[in-house]
Amino acid sequence: MGYTPEMKELIKRVEATRAERIERTRRGEYFTPMTLDERADVLKKFHPDYMDEGRRAVKLGPNKGDVYPEEIVDLFEAYPRLHPDQVDCSVLPTYTTDVLVVGGGGGGTAAALLAAENGAKVILATKLRHGDANTVMAEGGIQGADHEVDSPYFHFIDTLGGGHFTNRPYLLAALTRDAPLVIAWLEKLGMMFDKRPDGRMLVRHGGGTSRKRMHSAGDMTGSEIMRVVRDEARNRRDDIEIMEFSAAVEILKDAKGRACGALMYNLETEEYFVVRSRAVVLATGGNGRLHIQGFACTNHYGATADGLVLAYRAGVPMDFLHSTQYHPTGAAYPEQNVGLLITEKVRGLGANLLNIKGEQFVFEREPRDVESAAIIRECAERGLGIRTPVGRLGVWLDSPMIEELEGPGSVERELPAKYMQFIRYGIDIRTEPMLIYPTLHYQNGGIKIDQNAETGVPGLYAAGETTGGVHGENRLMGNSLLDILVFGRRAGVNAAAYVKSLGGDLGEPKLDHVRDYIRELEAAGVERTRISPMLLPDYTTDDVRQRQLTACYVGTMR
Ligand SMILES: Cc1cc2nc3c(=O)[nH]c(=O)nc-3n(C[C@H](O)[C@H](O)[C@H](O)COP(=O)(O)OP(=O)(O)OC[C@H]3O[C@@H](n4cnc5c(N)ncnc54)[C@H](O)[C@@H]3O)c2cc1C
């Protein structure tokens, strides 16, 4: 298949400017970065977060009145899958444990490991298979200031700048301080980091970083992290029980308002069951599959914001949920790859971003939101984007530069997954540029936590992409893999300590908070046309959606 003849013609313009651009890069010259005012201007005019359209105030709950993307508000203004009157926890199949971890990505698995290490019995329940998660898809790297010329201080400052100085400082301090510990922990678990010939860790720049601190494992860093943490969890069968295809649909609380487990739904048998626990950790990941503002997304199939809904109904406020990350470089062609992430590492290795004339228009290491806004401006306002046969717009990412700058074979060595994902459609990224456009990538905001990964509800912890505040309004590359492990580990340690502090106390599970929430929905005049949590993307046809609603409100529970 490959590029169309028309696109190949346009690529000649990229080739025409390449030699000169490579020379400039070799001399250490770059496209001039934007000033702070220029950044603010391009964000205001072109970043989707700054538009009024597609956003509205939520009518109820802890963040009543706050304005979020409509797709998220729709989930908060939706009825539970089951009315509490339909649920009698005393007759449902029930499992009991100390700590219930919801979510089988990197954050959840780290929490399970540390809770077990600290003496707790753990059930890790996950909606799909253990490891079906955004973590396994992560490509470019994980940040950690563990080199001589670097320190958590510089990491803190860089991340604060990237987040437009909005990050919660107590969370950021935890993130950057624990980072060297997390890198060492991963190595101890057997992670195969990219290394220099002398055995030292290979580190690179990411967007918005003043020091090279990005650690990687090819362009499959998340997969390698998931491999080691998952293996470790699976090896601790006596302490960690894994439940797959098991989705949490509601938090259970006892009469004292403490989290004491979850109402679960088995996606295979379509039966509900209960896990009773002394503490709960939510590590349910992001919301890419909501396709906010109609954007394509990079996320795995289960990224449907379930944790936000569960926590919100349990009375936990959200932090920074107004803010969404659109990754600057998502594939815009071929159609089969649309939305697919093109890791920032491609720009880190020297590839330029170019418009239809083959000209650079932005510094390649601006913070992600600024870079995305600049690409949207190039296409929307300046009309200098490249149009695909189906009418999508994009700009070029000149990957062949990497072979010139880093030596022959470097694309296959550094970006093996990307190489395969394009060559199968007849595009050789060693010799042809990629066409890219911003893609919905990351949920900047989420469940409000403190530095111990505690929410405001006793016994309820949260970690990873489902939380908000660490990154403020913009996350820097490599800080999420770090975030999920730092706060996953902290959640595990603190949940285990909390369990110990309770003694043998196991609360009687209730859904009174859900009943209260339904009353609020009714008082706010919300119609019964939506249910949440979504569990799987809403690509369902009307008849399936109708069946789901009927099963909840008219039919019987299996
Ligand atoms: C393509 C891609 C590339 C990325 N590259 C990088 C990178 O290079 N560096 C970086 O730092 N970050 C990167 N990120 C971001 C990072 O990978 C994620 O933010 C992070 O891995 C999220 O981890 P998590 O554990 O919070 O969530 P996830 O890894 O998504 O895990 C969430 C888990 O919860 C489960 N779940 C969801 N709802 C329920 C429910 N109701 N009941 C039970 N289980 C549920 C899901 O099935 C899943 O198993 C990338 C993300 C993507 C998508």
Image (cartoon, rainbow, N blue to C red):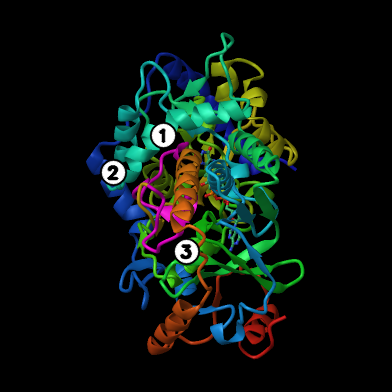
Q: Residue furthest top?
A: 198
Identify the residue shown where x is 60% and y is 20%.
403
Q: Which residues are magenta?
A: 452-479
- On the image, the x and y values in percent for residue 516 come to 42, 82
Is 473 magenta? The answer is yes
Position of residue 479 in the picture relative to residue 173 (left or right)? right
As shown in the figure, which amino acid type bears the numbered disc 1?
A: Asp
Looking at the image, residue 230 sits to the left or right of residue 282; the answer is right
Eye-nearest disc, 1 or 3:
1
Determine which residue is flagged by label 3. 308
The residue that label 2 is drawn on is: 169
Residue found at x 48% / y 78% = 514
Q: What residue sits right under mark 1 in the picture? A: 178
Which amino acid type is shown beneath numbered disc 3?
Leu
Can residue 129 be seen by looking at this rendering?
yes
User: What is the quadrant of residue 119 in the picture?
Assistant: top right
Q: Is residue 207 visible?
A: no
Please identify the quarter of the rendering in which residue 15 is found: top right
Give the prevailing secondary structure in the magenta stretch.
loop
Looking at the image, is 112 positioned above or below residue 544?
above
Mark 1 CB in 8 Å range of ligand 1? no
- Is 422 part of what is drawn in magenta? no
The answer to which of marks 1 and 3 sits earlier in the sequence is 1
Other-residue count near label 3 (Cα within 10 Å), few / some / many at <14 / 14–19 / ≥20 = many
